[in-house]
Amino acid sequence: MPIIIKTENEIEKMRVAGKLAAEVLEMIEPHIVPGVTTDELNSICHDYIVNVQGTVPAPLNYRGFPKSICTSINHTVCHGIPCDKKLKVGDIINVDITIIKDGYHGDTSKMFCVGEVSPHAKRLIKITQEAMYLGIKQVKQGAALGDIGHAIQTYAEANRYSVVREFCGHGIGKNFHEDPHVLHYGKAGEGEILEAGMIITVEPMLNQGKRHVKVLSDGWTAVTKDHSLSAQWEHTVLVTEQGYEILTLRREETNLA
Ligand code: MF3
Ligand code: CO
Ligand code: CO
């Protein structure tokens, strides 16, 4: 499939979808406390998405995924399935939200800390977020996809973390996952050249230990093989002539755009 260049009308719809996805993350923040189950977080998000926003939770029934959001705790790398497990003080959790509005997808995730977490966990979370921003800063018409991966990998490895390779960012629009694959590792100048009007996600997963992952028997939950901590952040990003526009920016980030 060729990479789809969005029209101005589609870009406007993607801006709306991106903003709504970001708002779900803002809404759920105060609910991430010790004792809450990931099922409860799923229900709160589902109800907000469907009843308050009037949008559609894209994960629900996507290739058989059973819930409306992904919740990935500690050594879970991504695609954790909400369940009756309670969050406890010291946990770190990624909440990944994808909503559909007017036929277009907004996809974004962030890390939350449950109470006070270890300095090691905080550092992993911070470096992973910075790696995502460094990747996003490469985005510009004429840049290569490899520039994004190279920036992320270089920064992650300089900080003694590893980059997960089995999962990557993606084009996004009418479809949840479109071409291209956006690798979070690689060589500068390699891969497809970005054009204004493309919309991609940048969503690096960094591990404290080795990069290797395994998928559990539920067919979804990806965990680190060595059970080391993992963190992920994700934004949906529009390629422009001058650079980029983050479509899923939250209020807490407006000084970073
Ligand atoms: N939101 C994930 C991504 O960033 C995909 C989740 S697929 C699901 O691409 F089925 F688990 F929801
Ligand atoms: Co994504
Ligand atoms: Co996502």
Image (cartoon, rainbow, N blue to C red):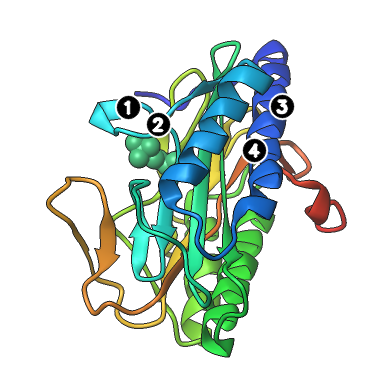
Badge 3 or badge 4: first in the primary sequence: 3
As shown in the figure, which amino acid type bears the numbered disc 3?
Answer: Arg
Of residue 211 and residue 232, the one placed in the foreground of this image is 232
As shown in the figure, which amino acid type bears the numbered disc 2?
Answer: Pro
- Labels 2 and 4 touching (C-beta < 8 A): no
As shown in the figure, which amino acid type bears the numbered disc 4?
Answer: Val
Query: Which numbered disc, 1 or 4, marks the residue closer to the eye?
Result: 4
Q: What element carries label 1?
A: helix
Q: Mark 2 points at which residue?
A: 59
Badge 3 or badge 2: first in the primary sequence: 3
The response on whether ligand 1 sits within 8 Å of label 2 is yes
Residue that appears at 54% across and 65% down: 34
**Whole-Å distance between the Cαs marked 1 and 4?**
19 Å
- Labels 1 and 3 touching (C-beta < 8 A): no
As shown in the figure, which amino acid type bears the numbered disc 1?
Answer: Tyr
Residue that appears at 87% across and 57% down: 255
Q: Mark 3 points at which residue?
A: 15
Estimate how packed mark 1 is, as few (under 14), some (14 to 19) or many (20 or more) residues with alpha carbons within 10 Å. few
